[in-house]
Image (cartoon, rainbow, N blue to C red):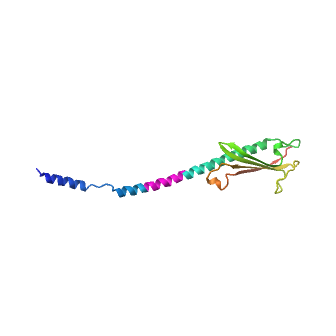
Amino acid sequence: MSAPGIVAESRQQQGYGQSGFTILETTIALLLMLIVALGSASLFSFSIYNNSGGSDRAVSLALAQQTLETLRSVTFTTAATDARLNGGTLVQNGVLRDGRSFQVTTIIDDNPATAAVDVAPNNTLKSITIIVESQSIGRGWAVGLGGRVTLITQRTRTE
């Protein structure tokens, strides 16, 4: 049998040799994890802004195409011309799509050969320009461009 003092001493030696994390090591590990988490949070923020800008641009393009198709479908013949194809500039503010506000500018030039927007109803060729801009754009990639979509086409008179 062993003496009681020897048993207590051997238990102390066993506890002394155990390894573990110190408070300093734990603090450094937590700081590293915090830095990684903050980096990924900024990426989430960046992607949200870009998705918002992309959504505005997609809705702007759909709105411009819809407006252009409407102008392509109206009458433009020698006998009659729809009033929507009269030369000039029409600006529509506050056009709502998907809960966002857009400005739609329609420019119809009766003489595309000149730099100015001409009004000459008897011409057989018209240049149609549709510009759609988001009025509620955030801080995404589209801010520099203003979220602008421009479609340009020409239309000739049919007999």
Q: Is residue 76 left or right of residue 68?
A: right
Residue at (53% x, 51% y) in the render: 44
Residue at (15% x, 54% y) in the render: 6
Residue situated in front as seen by the camera: 89 or 113: 89
Percent x, y for residue 100?
66, 44
Percent x, y for residue 45?
55, 51
Check if residue 42 falls in the magenta segment: yes
Percent x, y for residue 65?
72, 45
Q: Is residue 63 left or right of residue 138?
A: right
Q: Main secondary structure of the magenta part?
A: helix
Quarter of the image where one finds residue 14: bottom left
Percent x, y for residue 46?
56, 53
Span of residues in magenta: 32-44
Check if residue 67 falls in the magenta segment: no
Which quadrant is home to the C terminus?
Answer: top right
* Count of marks, rendered view: 0
The residue furthest left is 1
Residue at (42% x, 56% y) in the render: 31
Residue situated in front as seen by the camera: 18 or 9: 9
Q: Is residue 104 left or right of residue 4?
A: right
